[in-house]
Amino acid sequence: MTALRAERAHRSRRTLVVTTVLGAAAFAMFVLSMMWGSVWLSAGEVLGSLLRVTADRGTDFIVLELRLPQATTALTVGLALGVAGTLFQRLLRNPLAAPDFVGVSSGASVAAVAGIVVHGASGFGVSVLAVAGALVSAALMYVLAFRDGLRGYRFILVGIGVSAFMTGVVGYLLTRADLHDARQAMRWLTGSVGLAGPAELRVLMVALVVLVPAAVVLHRQLTALELGDDLARGLGTRVELARFALIALPVVLTGLATAVAGPIMFVALVAGPVAARLLAPATGGVLASGFAGAGLLLVADLVARHVLPAELPTGVVTGAVGAPYLLWLLATANREGVGG
Amino acid sequence: MTGRLRAERLSLGYEDRVVVEALDLDILDGRLTAIVGANACGKSTLLRGLARLLKPRAGQVLLDDRSLTEVATREVSKVLGMLPQTPVAPDGITVGDLVSRGRHPHQGWFRRWNDADEKAVTEALAATGTSDLVNRPIHQLSGGQRQRVWVAMALAQDTELLLLDEPTTFLDISHQVDLLRLLRDLNAQTSKTIVVVLHDLNLACRYVQHVIAMADGRVVTEGPPAEVVTPELVEKVFGLPCVVVPDPVAGTPMVVPLV
């Protein structure tokens, strides 16, 4: 076997193993989050209920009615954010360029909160508004940041500005709102898996079935775009079209995830690098990153619900873990010269 | 005789600035051609235009008598390869992975890696002397090795025409010579048409068969170095008073500044 063939085989084997392990870990967390609660269930009982093979009404009620919605929310939102994060980071060649960090999530929040507060929107309407908000905010950043191509740093700086502005608007809308439930407000400020609406969740699940395979297919274009616009064009890529798709897809995913759980920070930022650290260098893995995001959010949700003395919104936990990572990233990124 | 790649009344520019205006050019098939000229004379712009990285403002670039804007970019990329001045290597990427990405135009959405891909990449690595570097991250390589790897990637694309934008810019003299000899050998062995933008007129004279000299976005003259490189041309193109003497080794024209 030639060195070239061996190198390729090594890389694809590693991708397969890492993706499988991360997927299995996410699934294990998914099951664990349905076992853990005021009543402990065994993994067998949870799986039995999920597959409808046991007939214990009590267990079924706890698993399917009480715990499954929240576990599914954490799984799908984490998956969506993980996929969205890695696409953004690689397209903009910068680990800071995650959609939650650059104002896509906060754009979605503003539109969703405005819809809820001003028009009493709910369910599907909230999803539509959140996606629209995410798209508008991304378009705004694109226009402000685009100059002879898309540069990572410019996009990030504009994105942080947009994000701060949007967060301010959400705060303002919430003070104006006649919200009797303070926890509802928390969902839109910090993000919370526990307050998801079933309709928004269904929309996200359907979207994932379509958009995750689309992301896997688009990954091929990403491997060309990563080499710079000129070379990508020389290699026969339709650069503008591919870049549009690779921005629109994560923006829609982030918008839908935000509609479900609010602006959960740091999952999109961390998932891609976690997967990248495990994969062979520069391989990239859309699925691996999605599974990492799902696993991370499920763990954050477990910690928020059971480990801390008082039950907190999930976003607080992801923030507590993500903020130190962010500081580390800021401290090391420039030194290594990886910024773009 | 007309070449496969031609420019007709081609105008190119950026935003409100016109860099190349109404330029006619034939790229000679099977030759190693250098485009030379002073800084900002439009040589890189012309190359980018020829490689359809820049849309013509007027006129057209023809590949096999079809305007580049009318041919699907993927079809073009199977015939015409382009190595830009500053390509980007993703963090930690290995030489094998990077060179393999040159196969991009030959792969479809769902088509898997096949023997033709394997063969093209293996040959590209061998031709550039980078076969032993397959497992190495490109960031660990020296500038000269890295440039060879990029050329290997362009070769893996397996196109009959290859355009390179200032591939010698960040190399020291020995690696510049090394790279030009590589291009000369590739041209001799495969009769690929290679066009290279160069700063160094002496190196161009020594290693290429055909020189296109540009000034202010126009072609001043073109032809074999021995015929066209004269003190008058250098004065006109570079604004440098000089004498042109035969290179003591190869006998090709060598520019010696008078000031």
Image: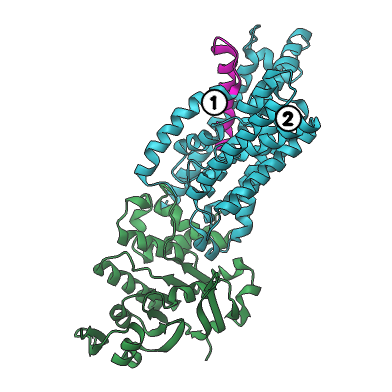
Chain colours: A cyan, B green
Name the residue located 30 percent from the left edge and 65 percent from the top edge: B171
Quadrant for residue B253, please give it. bottom left
Q: Residues within 10 Å of mark 2 (few under 14, many from 20)?
A: many
Over which residues does the magenta segment extend?
Answer: A289-314
Residue A340 percent across, percent down from the top left? 45, 50
Q: Is residue A196 magenta?
A: no
Residue A12 percent across, percent down from the top left? 50, 44
Above or below: residue B220 compared with residue B84: below
Same chain under badges 2 and 1? The reply is yes
Residue A10 percent across, percent down from the top left? 45, 43
Residue situated in front as seen by the camera: B87 or B2: B87
Q: Which residue is mark 2?
A: A201
Residue situated in front as seen by the camera: B179 or B25: B25
Q: Which residue is mark 1?
A: A318
Above or below: residue B110 compared with residue A46: below
Inspect the image, locate mark 1, and give the three-letter code of the amino acid beneath it: Thr
**Is A178 on the left-hand or right-hand side of A271?**
right
Inspect the image, locate mark 2, and give the three-letter code of the amino acid beneath it: Leu
Quarter in which the C terminus of chain B is drawn: bottom left
Quadrant for residue B55, please give it. bottom right
Residue situated in front as seen by the camera: B160 or A155: A155
Q: Is residue A287 visible?
A: no
Q: Is residue A311 magenta?
A: yes
The tag earlier along the polypeptide, 2 or 1, is 2
Name the residue located 55 percent from the left edge and 43 percent from the top edge: A159
Subunit under mark 1: A
